[in-house]
Amino acid sequence: MLDKYYRGETSLEEEKELKAAVSESKTKSAEKDIFSFYQKEAKVPDGLEDDLFAGIETQLVKKKSIRMQLYSVISAAAVVLIVLTVSLDVRNKRQTQLADQFFVMEQALFQVSESLQPEPEPDEMLILWVDDDVEIIIN
């Protein structure tokens, strides 16, 4: 029966009979040691199921708290991004408005200065080029 067990050809009932026969025998054998070891190790400690479920619940709570922290950080980053975008847009609009107002003032001052300057007389000379040795003048 041991040969059949080692070949893996025994049924569960035959294995139970073999284990019972080997453990009842008075002689010391390797099979007796192996079967007694497996019998001791096969017992489930008390409270193992509760410990497993408690560990699973703890892990789930940790994952949920990490997820909530991550959502909080992402939400805060989104709010900062929105506020920054709006403030930059307002700043750009203000700068554009100031540039437009400056251009209008510049045009107005140019028109005022044109109206206040006397028109050049036709017999005045127009100087095109002045150098140490050469002057170009148009009448």
Image (cartoon, rainbow, N blue to C red):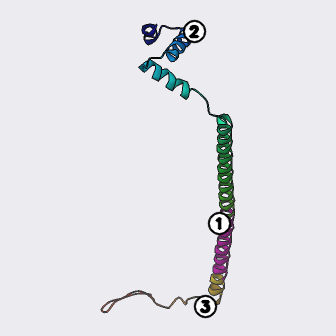
Counting residues from the start of the chain, the first of labels 1 and 3 encountered is 1
Tag shown at residue 88: 1
Range drawn in magenta: 84-108
Relative to 6, say whether 97 is above or below: below
Using the image as rendered, state which of residue 8 and residue 39 is in the foreground: 39
Counting residues from the start of the chain, the first of labels 2 and 1 encountered is 2
| 120 drawn magenta | no
Residue named by callout 3: 118
Residue 39's spot in the image, x, y percent? Answer: 55, 24
In three-dimensional space, the C-alpha distance between marks 2 and 1, rounded to whole angstroms, equals 81 Å
> Hey, what amino acid is under mark 1?
Leu
Counting residues from the start of the chain, the first of labels 2 and 3 encountered is 2
Residue named by callout 2: 13
Relative to 56, say whether 42 is above or below: above
State the SS at label 1: helix
Residue 117's spot in the image, x, y percent? Answer: 61, 90
